[in-house]
Image (spheres, rainbow, N blue to C red):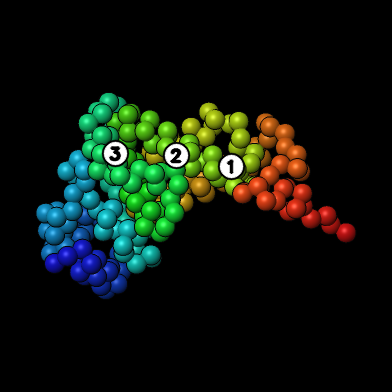
Amino acid sequence: MDLKQAVSILNKQLKTKKPDKFSSTWVLANAPRVYRFVRLNLRTENNQIDWDRVTYRLDRPFQKRWVYYQGKVAKKYEDKVEVDLVINRHRPKLYVLMAPITNADKRRLEQIIISLVRIAQKGNLLAQQELCHWLSYVIEEWIDRYSTFAHWRGYDDRIQANIEGCIRRYRYTGCFLGYLYRTLEYSGRGLVPLQKFSFDDPVLDGSKTKIDYFVQED
């Protein structure tokens, strides 16, 4: 069995059983071959069972039904080795954290981020710090690129709080960046811009300015 076959079997079982929610325990009971394959062959950099690699590939309707169990509130600790194992594994491709180009780059970006998220959820403060460092670059690009994010400029403390909140709450095994984007989009409504702008300010590659996108109503 390989990963593609495991995902196919699990998809079929989910279509047949139609559970409202499912977890690793459900997989063990309803698709034991898949469970054994994942337990033996799919491991994170820190030797945890990597269910994210499986659930990410499931049919979209089933992805959000996955329950990522977490026990009691995690005790805070600092372990640089856990973080380094993730960073070193992806070191040749770390540029994707700042400038993903292809779809493969974007997938690698998500892999790195979710790996660090899972470690941070265990309580590793250094993993959280690493995430906040890299995600700040991503958010800066959103602020520069999207007008709906422009009002976030200057609200560094609130951005940090939203990142940390997303890390704590994240359970879905899909796109963490999409979750963070929507969170900032919704929570940013009503923010008063702290920095003034001019209609002569450049947009995107600088070939146009804000006035080029301004439409005056009759």
Identify which residue is drawn at 26% across, 58% down.
54
User: Mark 3: which amino acid?
Assistant: Ile
Q: For the view shown, which residue lies furthest in the front direction?
A: 207
User: Which label is found at residue 143?
Assistant: 1
Q: Give me the C-alpha separation between circle 2 and circle 3.
A: 14 Å
Is residue 29 rendered to the left or right of residue 143? left
Which of 199/215 is in front? 199
Question: Helix or strand or loop: what does disc 2 sit on?
Answer: helix
How dense is the environment of label 3, judged by Cα within 10 Å: few (below 14), some, or many (20 and up)?
Answer: some
In the picture of the structure, the residue carrying the numbered disc 3 is 87
Which of 159/142 is in front? 142
Closer mark to the observer between disc 3 and disc 1 = 3
Residue 49 locus on image (x, y percent): 19, 49
The quarter of the picture where residue 92 lies is: top left
Identify which residue is drawn at 68% across, 44% down.
202
How dense is the environment of label 1, judged by Cα within 10 Å: few (below 14), some, or many (20 and up)?
Answer: some
User: Which label is found at residue 135?
Assistant: 2
Observer able to see residue 28:
no
Asked whether the beta carbons under mark 2 and mark 3 sit within 8 Å of each other, the answer is: no
Is residue 23 rendered to the left or right of residue 153? left
**Sequence-wise first label, 3 or 1:** 3
Identify which residue is drawn at 26% across, 34% down.
84
Residue 186 locus on image (x, y percent): 57, 46
Q: Give me the C-alpha separation between circle 3 and circle 1.
A: 26 Å
Is residue 153 rendered to the left or right of residue 1? right
User: Mark 2: which amino acid?
Assistant: Leu
Question: Helix or strand or loop: what does disc 1 sit on?
Answer: helix
Q: Is residue 34 above or below residue 183?
A: below
Q: Is residue 16 above or below residue 51?
A: below
